[in-house]
Image: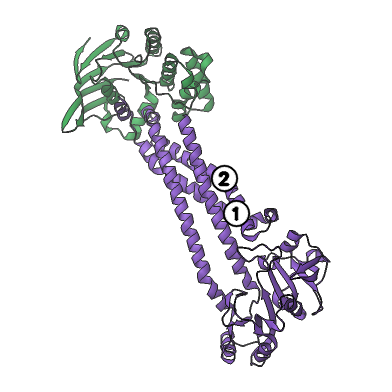
Amino acid sequence: MRIKTADLTKTYRMGPSQIAAVNRVSLEVDEATFVAIVGPSGSGKSTLLNLIGLNDTPTQGKVLIDDADASLLSASERRRIRLMRMGFVFQTFNLMPTLSALENVELPMALAGASQKAQRERSAKLLETVGLTGRVRHRPKELSMGEMQRVAIARALANRPEVIIADEPTGELDSKTAKEIISLLFEANREEKTTVIVATHDEKVVSVANKTYIIKDGNLETEK
Amino acid sequence: MFRRKVRTSLSIIGVALATAFVIAVGATTMRYTTVIKEMSVLFSGQIMVTSSNAVVIQAIPIGGSMLPQNYTDRKIQDITGVDKTVPVLFVTPMSLTGIIQTVPVNFTMGIPVEDWKTVIGPTPLRGNSGHFPTNESGSEVVVGASLADQYNWTVDSTVFLNSHKLTVAGILETKLALLNRCVLMPLKLAQRVYNYPGSVNIIAVKPAQGIIQKNLTETIEAKMDYVQALTEDERNDMVQPVLAQVETWDVGVQSVVLIMSLIQVMAVSAMSVSERRRDFATLDAMGAPLNYVFRIVVLESTLIGVLGGLLGICFGSLASLTLASLYTSIPITLFFPSLFEIVPPLYVAEILLAAMFVCCAGGILPALNAMRMRVSEVLRADY
């Protein structure tokens, strides 16, 4: 999946004034690349990822998915793209607390209408890949933070997405666990040819990225 | 999670209590209105003559003076258009236990022995054993099945009523609540037992063929200013507004209780949705179909309705039986076999459906809110 943004802007009204969380951002993400978006807290990284992940609509500008303007898509087409072609990893994992690790991974496949058998097999395989074979029946509250993020990565990979969008995936983790999580994302990028877009402060992520964008006060400042 | 479980459990109990209240109130009022309605079976197609100051509820005269039997009977028979008359002594309440009852539950009817069928129709006797009394001056009576079961009376049992020794000659097998709680005896015996010699409080009048009942009642009332004569339609018309009012109040109370349940379920669902904003937003981010979250929330609230409704049906049925027992001083165990008459299954199904519908409706607004959760907004609000 090729993603491009053109003059992408998102403003929020804060009382009488308008704040530009993302300001005229133009970037390009090629297929099978590992992209890092780096910037301090409140710089607009999450907002940019939400716009790229079609979870938010821009105030101005465009997001182009394979050169097609995403703003022209219907709400259900955008959902379909998010479900089938994108995977999401959040800083706070966002696992369903009432579901087991296995069921959490099955969820996107269930939403996509996969058979029960296919869901079970792929979930078990993905959890094995992320090193959680013995934890499949555990609920999120019974898992460590690192384990929860592994489940989240397995969930993001469930529908074989073309792109994984990860918002501060190592933000809540210690450095050792963070390294393991980055390795998992890197493996997905290298072996499955999945595009990975990560918003992060973490230097270790930057070191494995093919391309790094630095964002500050909503403006894309430099590109490495 | 624990708080959510507690809240959901409390919500289910809330719906259960509301359902139980609706069933208990509804079933109880329904039972009494049915009993009143079915009384019209007695004296069906006949004119009922009572004293002018008596209040008549279907077939029961309440209060009012006694009528001199022979004088009144003869005067009515002299009126053109009268085919037959049956003098009846109807007494209520009749205390068999000395306990004062909130509503009349026991009755005595004194009827001339040759006129049993005119009043009670073809009511059979239990097990085809026993017989209807044939001696006007004897001490034999027939009793309703419910009375017999309560006091363990069988054919040939001895019953003491107002210090008179009576013998049970048969047990009436009937579904009519009035006859089930009735002691039927020859008119002369009833007059002796209750010390009303030569007096009755009802004279049932069968009009001759082709006679317009309304005209006959007017003639009777014109000839005897101390009586009122009521056709079957008039008796029904007298009680209908009261029954309609009771039913309206019943529907009103049920509606208020169900609306309160709706508000309760709505509040609980709203709290539950608010606690799970992140979950719903995550589902939205993952690309769940637009109505997926809506269905989850509505299904949850409907399940609260189903579980609460089922629990409420159990509580409500028990409460209905308890109320019936309290009102009548009849042991609750005697009501168990007639559970489905006191709490009709169709009524229970209606209330269960209403509880489900109310809870489903209560989930709609919170579900619409849940549908609108976007991960970008939820995460932004969290920071």
Q: Few, some or many C-alpha atoms within 10 Å of disc 1 (few <14, some 14-19, many ≥20)?
A: many
Which label was assigned to residue A9?
A: none
Question: In the rendered structure, which amino acid carries the disc numbered 1?
Answer: Ser
Report the residue at 64% width, 55% height from top.
Answer: B340
Q: Is residue A161 left or right of residue B184?
A: left
State whether residue A29 appears in this view: yes
State yes or no: discs 2 and 1 in contact (Cβ < 8 Å): no
Q: Determine which residue is flagged by label 2.
A: B310
Which label was assigned to residue B320?
A: 1
Q: Position of residue B88 (x, y in %)?
A: 69, 79
Q: Position of residue B128 (x, y in %)?
A: 81, 66
Question: To which chain does the residue with label 2 belong?
Answer: B
Image quadrant assignment for residue B266: top left
Mark 2 or 1: in front is: 1
Rendering colour (chain B): purple
Residue B238's place in the image compared with B383, above or below, is: below
Image quadrant assignment for residue B50: bottom right
Q: Is residue B39 left or right of residue B381?
A: right
State whether residue B352 appears in this view: no
Q: Nearer the viewer, residue A185 or B213?
A: B213
Q: Which chain is green?
A: A
Residue B224's place in the image compared with A158, above or below, is: below
Secondary structure of the residue carrying tag 1 is: helix
Q: Few, some or many C-alpha atoms within 10 Å of disc 2 (few <14, some 14-19, many ≥20)?
A: many
Report the residue at 82% width, 78% height from top.
Answer: B135
Question: In the rendered structure, which amino acid carries the disc numbered 2?
Answer: Leu
Q: Nearer the viewer, residue B95 or B24?
A: B95
Secondary structure of the residue carrying tag 2 is: helix
Kindly report the distance in space between the C-alpha atoms of the residues bearing marks 2 and 1: 15 Å
Q: Is residue B291 left or right of residue A15?
A: right
Q: Position of residue A184 (x, y in %)?
A: 40, 11
